[in-house]
């Protein structure tokens, strides 16, 4: 059967509407089924610094003048998928920042957006990786002060000790500083992380029967930082 011009035009229009409708439904289902959690601009101010950024730290617990420069050598952005028994899954954004250092032994910092937690406005985490292969979560802003979260091996127990509106380190006043504590089987570490500067102070103490003994304390001397847009 031969269709005239009007019949052909109507058929093409109906076909286009049908496929357009199917496409819209499919995209809508995917978007509604899996949410994407993004890294907030507020959290980026604490942890997201671009290539060519660097920090210079001084070890205060040494008789010699130990200085270490930590440099950002590469930044990669990623979108990952997470699922567990409590939810159908979600996509989350992540940033991996490659680092070079000597004495502190840092090789990488990792930022990942998390699942929403009550009314908090920063549900991300910051994790440090070391030459030794060890890694620790050093910032979980949404955890209430003085509460402890067991993260298993090798990360140990994490807690937020305090939030300092102002914290003096090495003669400099920093604003909005998280102090976190990580305890493993034999070590207690404290990380001081400031808005717009990242890590400004780090201490490590061996745990023994006679109490803690500080064997490492590093403080920020100077920095040159480029925020990740």
Image: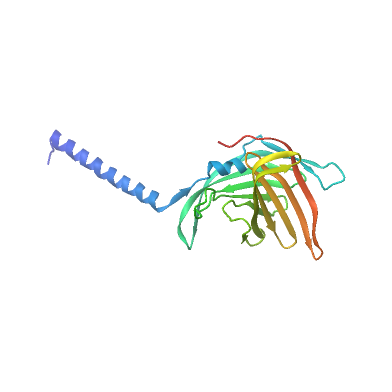
User: In which quarter of the view is residue 177 placed?
Assistant: top right
108 or 199: nearer the eye? 199
Q: Relative to residue 5, is residue 14 depicted above or below?
A: below
Seen as rendered, the residue at the extreme front is 165
In the image, what residue occupies the spot 60% across and 36% down? 227
Quick check: can you spot residue 181? yes
User: In the picture, which quadrant includes the N terminus?
Assistant: top left
Counting from the top left corner in percent of width and height, residue 87 is at 46, 59
Q: Please indicate, yes or no, whether residue 150 appears anywhere in the rendered image.
A: no
| Furthest-bottom residue in this view | 209
- Report which quarter residue 98 is drawn in: top right
Q: Residue at x 61, y 55 (%)?
A: 145
Name the foreground residue: 225 vs 177. 177
Query: Measured from the top left, where is residue 97 in percent x and y?
Result: 63, 43
In the image, taking residue 36 as reference, residue 1 lies left or right, namely left
The percent position of residue 130, horizontal first and vertical second, equals 70, 50
- How many numbered tags mark residues here? 0
Q: Is residue 168 left or right of residue 93?
A: right
Residue at figure coordinates x 62%, y 34% from the top left: 226
Q: How is the image coloured?
A: rainbow
Q: From the viewer's perspective, is residue 206 above or below residue 197?
A: below
Asked if residue 189 lies left or right of residue 22, the reply is right
Quadrant where the C terminus lies? top right
The location of residue 142, given as percent across then percent down, is 56, 53
Residue 5, quarter of picture: top left
Q: Residue at x 71, y 46 (%)?
A: 106
Q: With 189 as the anchor, is 147 left or right in this view?
A: left
Vertical relation: 38 (above or below) 181: above
């Amino acid at each position: 059967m031969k269709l005239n011009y009007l019949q052909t035009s109507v058929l093409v229009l109906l076909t286009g509407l049908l496929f357009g409708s199917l496409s819209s439904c499919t995209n809508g289902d995917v978007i509604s089924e899996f949410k994407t959690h993004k890294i907030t601009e507020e959290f980026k101010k604490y942890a997201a610094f671009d290539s060519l950024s660097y920090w210079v730290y001084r070890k205060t617990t040494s008789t010699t003048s130990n200085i270490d420069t930590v440099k950002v050598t590469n930044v990669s952005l990623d979108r990952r998928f997470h699922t567990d028994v409590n939810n159908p899954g979600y996509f989350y954004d992540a940033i991996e920042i490659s680092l070079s250092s000597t004495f502190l032994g840092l090789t990488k910092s990792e930022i990942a957006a998390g699942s929403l937690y009550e009314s908090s406005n920063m549900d991300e985490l910051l994790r440090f990786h070391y030459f030794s292969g060890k890694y620790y979560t050093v910032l979980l802003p949404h955890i209430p002060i003085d509460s402890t979260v067991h993260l298993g091996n090798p990360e140990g127990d994490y807690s937020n000790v305090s939030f300092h509106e102002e914290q003096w380190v090495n003669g400099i006043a920093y604003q909005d500083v998280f102090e976190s504590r990580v305890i493993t089987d034999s070590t207690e570490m404290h990380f001081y992380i400031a808005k717009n500067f990242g890590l400004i102070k780090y201490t490590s103490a061996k745990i023994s029967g006679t109490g803690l003994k500080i064997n490492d304390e590093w403080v920020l001397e100077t920095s040159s930082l480029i925020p990740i847009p």
